[in-house]
Image: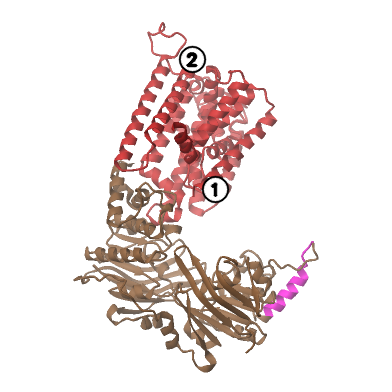
Amino acid sequence: MFFKSLQKLLKENIREYGMYIALFVIMLIFTITTDGIFISSRNISNLLNQTGYIAVLAVGMTLVIVIRHIDLSVGFLAGFLGAVAAIALAFWNLPVYVVIPLVLVLGVVAGLFTAFPIAQLKVPAFVASLAGWLIYRGALLLVTAGTGTIIIADETFNAIGNGFIPDIPGLENFLPGVHKLTLLLGLVAIALYVVSQFRDRRKKLSYNFETLPMNMFIAKLVFISVLLALITWVLAGYNGLSWTVVIVLLVVGIYHFVTTQTVLGRHIYAVGGNPEAAELSGISVKKITYVVFGSMGMLAGLSGILFASRLRSATVTAGTLFEMDAIAAAYIGGVSAAGGVGNVMGSLIGALVTMSLTSGMNLMNIDIAYQYIVRGAVLLAAVIFDVTTRSRGR
Amino acid sequence: MDTPILEMRNITKEFPGVRALNNVSFRVAKGEIHCLVGENGAGKSTLMKVLSGVWPYGSYTGDIYLDGELQTFRHVTDSEKAGIGIIYQELALVPELSVYENIFLGHEISNGVTVDWNETIKRANEMLARVRLDVNPATKIKDLGVGKQQLVEIAKALNRNVKLLILDEPTAALNDDDSANLLQLLREQKAHGVTCIMISHKLREVMAIADTVTILRDGQTVCTLDAHKGEVTEQVMIRHMVGREIDNVYPPRVGHRPGDEVVFEVKDWNAYDPRLGRQVLKQVNLKIRKGEIVGLAGLMGAGRTELALSLFGNFPHYEISGEIYVQGKPVKFSHPRDAIENGVAYLTEDRKGNGLILIQDVKQNISLANLKTLANRGIVDANAEIKVANEYRASLNIKTPSVAQKVINLSGGNQQKVCLGKWLFVKPNILILDEPTRGIDVGAKYEIYTIMNRLVQEGMSIIMISSELPEILGMSDRIYVVSEGRITGELPVEEANQEIIMQMATN
């Protein structure tokens, strides 16, 4: 009985759960092939930190693709803005609290700059952002021309990409070797998740909306809670939550809230779902285009900061192919090029899938050439899966 | 009697929920110009699509004989091979290619590897001479006017040695000179032995050119008239076109009279379309009173939707002049948002194309145009949204399992009610309904009419665009007739009947 309804649930929601299952399977395979090294605290912690700068780009890219556009310029924009941050810190001696907002604002400006020909003159986004790709690549070469790699000495800045949150003081003897604050935050997250799910379910039931049957609902809660608990335990076993993970979770959380709960978010999805209908409903498609590209630019700035901080320097090649990784992550996460479909959570999972592949294959010492081929095959499989399940759903 | 070049016997074609063609028979004699006439939706275009293989053999019932031989077209290329050439309202030319490339598109003269451009241009010149089009064959299509493009289409069809040329409203987009020129050309092709079927709304043209006229109504052949026996007159054609019995499908508005207060007025409204290079709206003047339903009648392509959209602030590339007054106050709408804020709403004729967001659910579609009233500091109140959606679901009788159902899963009538709900939720004073009952079943139509009556009784004013004359007559208090971008008539419903309106609309 239980397994029958579980089977039915998976069958009907295969689109929604597909990528979680894929991520789980990929992690399982690598854990087996690497004799458990893959799932070790140290590796998972590293993997998450490496995912950070792609994940924030993927979040922004999700919205760009939702409104039926693309932004190829963000990789080198991130590289360029990372270099600006390095220069501001190293040569202009600006404090880190000024540099970060400055870079984010510059990112917004760059995004609006990309949006202008797209929104105003109907230039295809592919071409407009390809121009940006060239321009920011040139700009990055220009600012690093005299110095080459710029070393960043500011420890606060470098902590963003390498540091971990502090532990609760005075508990050194309780559970030694385990990060207590991380553990606590993990428990809080699980509690919040369970409570919010129950409230959501109650509300849906009161409106007679479709809900999962009770046993499936409990199964889902247990599954997600155990997953969260496992991740928490694994992370707590190394250095705890890194600042990168905190930032990514904040960004995903804010974007998830904006896209699902606010007028702006609904307008973005309306424009993606049917731009003509949105326009005739009084929504300015132009305005939404500016907002989405502006946000993309800001996240490119954040991505640049995360990457520069992680390397403790700005390099001449920073940002190379980030845009492609972000686009791949968004598509693996279920975004549709037809517009109006996709969510930021999915893109985060997509980013984790690509990074898990890279990390796992590195641990297995697989040649880089094969790594690219495997990643390409996974992207293709994900999109084929998406397209076929979609047409069946109609 | 000779074997007819074309005979279609007992053709029936059904779409989900609609029988577009019901046992239609249609005979065309060799070498004649045969006009196919009927109201919008009578089945003319569907019949031609069956003939040309757009609707393949097997998707309809009945038989098609060409020169006495049974035909089973599975694709447009099959009917092309059999000698049928069809020219649609939307021309099928490639704008960026030259005239000669377009004429030989898909039938290039080649030695198997490369195209012989010299021979192509020479032959293209011959074809252009035959349609009396004096242009350089190297001219790009996009640099030609619509009238000349039409001639290129005909040259393209003649080049393939068509026996039977079908033209779907060829003069709809043409000015008088170009139309006259085209008709003259068709007469010349007749002399060359080409048989012609022409669909047209312009009855004067039909009288000028037709040898035979077949009239369709509600998917059935009404009659075939022979011009040489003097059977083709405007009165006869109009009578057969509209001659259906009007059953009592319109709920009466009891005890309601429109007020005197003018709530919406349009003065000297003009729109020029620089892409088409012509005036799409000319000196339009309209007045709508409080609690009134004003019908906007006219044939397809008369400019009614263009008028409605331009009044609603949606004119991406038109050059507009004129004034709009809402409740006596002059207003300017540069975006639909401005119109909505001034209490004007527009329900589109194309609900799937630009009305609904099909992949979103009922509540999201209903709240779309007025989401900000459901939000507190930019955050949508999900409970309030559900409550509002449920209110409209009840008051408009939207049949859906819940308001969280995706709109794509609803029937046409219920989708239309969702659209209507969206616009009622912005609480408009003036509601423009563009073909509000297109493609929905009789029961849902009646419900929509009842809702319209309720709305005007509550003091709303409605402009209803409709191609169905009975609907215009059954629902309106007053009627404007639009033809070629102009208001060609205004009359109270008491003085109107289908013949008068059709006369004004085909003017």
Image quadrant for the N terminus of chain A? top left
What numbered label is drawn on residue B13?
A: none
Query: In the picture, which chain is red?
Result: A
Q: Position of residue B58 (x, y in %)?
A: 58, 66
Q: Position of residue A380 (x, y in %)?
A: 61, 40
Q: Position of residue B52 (x, y in %)?
A: 60, 71
| Of the pair A153 and B381, the residue shown nearer to us | B381
- Badge 1: residue crowd in 10 Å (few <14, some 14–19, many ≥20): many
Answer with mark 1 or mark 2, whichever residue precedes in sequence. Answer: 1
Query: In the picture, which chain is brown?
Result: B
- Tag 1: amino acid: Ala
- Tag 2: amino acid: Gly
Q: Which residues are magenta?
A: B113-129
**What residue did someone put label 1 on?**
A125
Res. B466 image quadrant: bottom left
Colour theme:
by chain
Above/below status of A61 relative to A118 = above
**What residue did someone put label 2 on?**
A237
Above/below status of B382 relative to A356 = below
Compared across the picture, whether B498 is left or right of B186 comes to left
Q: Position of residue B231 (x, y in %)?
A: 49, 91
